Amino acid sequence: MTTTDGARKAQALAHGAVEARVAACAQISAPVTSVYRWQQAIETAQEWQVTFKTTTARYGELERYLLGAHDYDTPEIIAIPVTHGGADYLAWITEETS
């Protein structure tokens, strides 16, 4: 999962990850309001959240893609493990990221 400050940027990150097959799917939720501390000040910003569906095996490549494609100095990159899921859906993710 990551966030960015524009809808077009979110779409570009999502499209690029799926095209590179480091994610089978990317979902964009927006806008969200983020409140955070940055450079000793509390900031508030409107951001678009992008959730990527990938496998453990492809996570490293997805992270490298995001670090190279993202324009934030310190982009949010968070992985949340899937403990259960539909077998057909999980197989589809594996197939699309192979």
Image (spheres, grey):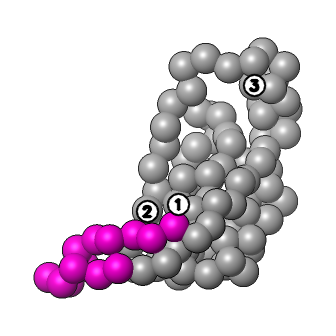
**If the image is split into quadrants, where does the C terminus sit?**
top right
Residue 91 position within the rendered picture, expressed as x and y whole percent measured from the top left: 81, 23
Task: Say the numbered circle drawn on residue 90.
Answer: 3
Q: Which residues are magenta?
A: 32-44
Q: Give the residue number, with chain letter if any, for mark 2.
A: 76
Residue 22 visible here: no
Q: Of label 2 and label 3, which has the lower sequence position? A: 2
Left or right, 47 with reference to 8 = left
User: Sequence-wise, which precedes: disc 3 or disc 1?
Assistant: 1
Q: Is residue 4 visible?
A: yes
Q: Quadrant of residue 28?
A: bottom right
State yes or no: discs 1 and 2 in contact (Cβ < 8 Å). Answer: yes
Q: Amino acid at mark 1?
A: Thr
Residue occupying the point 46% across, 57% down: 77
As drawn, the label of residue 2 is: 1
Neighbor class of circle 3 (other Cα within 10 Å; few <14, some 14-19, many 20+) is some
Asked if the magenta segment contains residue 34, the reply would be yes
How far is the residue under mark 3 from the one under mark 1? 21 Å
- Relative vertical location of residue 2 with respect to residue 90 in this rendering, above or below: below
